[in-house]
Image (cartoon, rainbow, N blue to C red):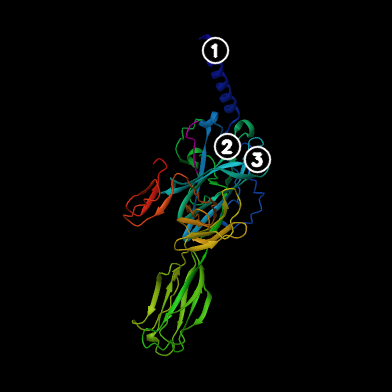
């Protein structure tokens, strides 16, 4: 009993010593150099940049520590807005940061929250222990799974995931005034720092005497992408074409179709053009003879009519600015390999998606579907001489999803104790001892007879 008590006391002393050591060195804000810029050469498509105007106030602690220091885990978040009519697919986050010692911080937690009237709202996406590439000063380049965000205001949170015992602290640097959008927010759920701010509070509440209330971050990725629209021309009246009339289509003010027309007949005749999410689509119609018989409409990528003008309501009108806003479906790719169960590739297998079609595998067993809309698909893989395999695969916007198939050959078991033969219903075999007719045309030989 005394040994147990002694062991318990020693354990408590070690824990308290560890906490006291942490408390002695840990800080809520960076006491080191501030105002540094990113050393990364950003060759990605930048969706949002709040990284180019470093502030002079110290960076804030925003870290996921080892389990023994969980009460010190802290989180910062700052807001950004996806413009109306746009869709962002974020696959990379860059942040400016610094270390209390040397780091390095090679993992990070990235979260996206909804906006709640200017404050951090509900958690939408969470990417834990995402791979972070640091530079020497503590700036982080973080790769995350493709995350689709429609128009609206959001909050992004980044935590350096690093053990204090080996790397020290990581701090998220700030951007200089003036404040962009809303002030950044901060929380320390375990209240290890003793601020009392266990829930989200504005930066000016936590640091009232300072001036920099933006955090340094950039979002990289792609927009919803380009997709195919159509304009359909008809002559529902007399059916003799447009008689010299024509129409041009513009995307963001630039002509993508010039003076297209219906030369003869009722139509329709279709013309394709490309637009991206957020693009402005307009038209310019030029009348010919009997223009009141003309009609044209614009079809979205799903074949739905989003604008129509002309017959039977008179001469077609121009589609003027702001026109139609491009809205492309979110898409992703699906690829993979088809193997035998022993790992040998199967050439000529068919991978099929209902409503999309099938693709064959090449000599390496590889298959590819491109531009699949974001949803769950039932994917069927077949090959002659192999048992089929079915999988439910989720397509991610702006990403390539991989799914491999392993096909086995069907097992055929022949037992000397079971022989199947076909007889006419009601026919009895009397020449073979042990043959029993079941009455439905099937006979079995039972060795026990």
**Residue 335, position in %: x, y?**
56, 56
**Residue 303, position in %: x, y?**
42, 69
Against 175, is 298 above or below? below
Residue range in magenta is: 185-191
Q: Which residue is mark 3?
A: 33
Q: Residue at x 62, y 30 (%)?
A: 165
Q: Secondary structure at mark 1?
A: helix
Q: State the quadrant of the C terminus.
A: top left
Most distant residue in the front direction: 431
Most foreground residue, 195 or 115: 115
Q: Which residue is mark 1?
A: 6
Q: Is residue 218 visible?
A: no
Q: Is residue 17 visible?
A: yes
**Residue 133, position in %: x, y?**
63, 45
Q: Secondary structure at mark 2?
A: loop
Q: Which residue is mark 2?
A: 29
Q: Quadrant of residue 264?
A: bottom left
Assess disc 3: are there few (<14), some (14-19) or many (≥20) residues with their C-alpha within 10 Å of its C-alpha: some
Q: Residue at x 37, y 56 (%)?
A: 423
Q: Is residue 287 left or right of residue 172?
A: left
- Mark 2–mark 3 Cα distance, whole angstroms, equals 11 Å
- First reached walking from the N terminus: tag 3 or tag 1: 1
**Of marks 1 and 2, the one in the foreground:** 1
Q: Quadrant of residue 242?
A: bottom left
Most foreground residue, 241 or 12: 241
**Of marks 3 and 1, the one in the foreground:** 1
Q: Is residue 239 left or right of residue 106?
A: left
């Amino acid at each position: 009993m005394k040994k147990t008590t002694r062991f318990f006391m020693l354990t408590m002393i070690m824990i308290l010593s560890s906490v006291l050591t942490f408390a002695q060195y840990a800080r809520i804000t960076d006491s080191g150099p501030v105002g540094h810029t990113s050393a990364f050469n950003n060759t990605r498509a930048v969706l949002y940049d709040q990284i180019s105007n470093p502030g002079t106030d110290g960076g804030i602690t925003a870290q996921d520590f080892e389990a023994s220091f969980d009460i010190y885990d802290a989180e910062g978040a700052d807001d950004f807005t996806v413009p109306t009519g746009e869709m962002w697919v974020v696959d990379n986050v860059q942040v400016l940061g610094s270390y209390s010692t040397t780091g390095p911080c090679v993992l990070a937690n990235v979260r996206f929250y909804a906006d709640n009237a200017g404050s951090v709202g509900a958690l939408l996406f969470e990417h834990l222990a995402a791979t972070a590439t640091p530079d020497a000063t503590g700036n982080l380049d973080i790769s995350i799974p493709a995350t689709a965000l429609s128009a609206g205001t959001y909050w992004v949170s980044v935590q350096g995931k690093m053990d204090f015992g080996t790397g020290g602290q990581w701090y998220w640097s700030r951007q200089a005034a003036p404040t962009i959008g809303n002030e950044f927010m901060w929380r320390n759920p375990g209240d290890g720092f003793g601020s009392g701010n266990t829930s989200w509070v504005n930066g000016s509440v936590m640091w009232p005497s300072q001036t920099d209330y933006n955090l340094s971050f950039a979002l990289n990725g792609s927009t919803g992408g380009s997709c195919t629209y159509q304009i359909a021309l008809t002559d529902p009246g007399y059916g003799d074409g447009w008689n010299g009339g024509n129409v041009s289509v513009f995307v963001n003010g630039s002509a993508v179709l010039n003076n297209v027309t219906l030369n003869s007949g009722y139509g329709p005749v279709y013309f394709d053009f490309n637009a991206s999410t957020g693009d402005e689509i307009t038209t310019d119609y030029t009348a010919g003879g009997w223009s009141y018989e003309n009609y044209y409409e614009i079809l979205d990528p799903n074949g739905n009519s989003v604008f129509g003008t002309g017959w039977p309501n008179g001469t077609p009108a121009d589609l003027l600015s702001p026109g139609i806003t491009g809205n492309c479906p979110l898409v992703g790719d699906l690829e993979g390999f088809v193997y035998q169960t022993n790992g040998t590739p199967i050439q000529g297998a068919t991978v099929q998606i209902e409503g999309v079609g099938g693709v064959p595998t090449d000599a390496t067993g590889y298959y590819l579907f491109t531009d699949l809309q974001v949803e769950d698909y039932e994917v069927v893989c077949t090959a002659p001489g192999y048992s089929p395999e079915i999988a439910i695969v989720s397509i991610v916007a702006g990403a390539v999803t991989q799914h491999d198939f392993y096909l086995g050959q069907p097992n055929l078991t022949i037992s000397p104790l079971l022989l199947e033969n076909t007889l006419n219903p009601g026919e009895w075999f009397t020449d073979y001892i042990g043959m029993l007719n079941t009455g439905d045309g099937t006979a079995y030989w039972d060795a026990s007879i």
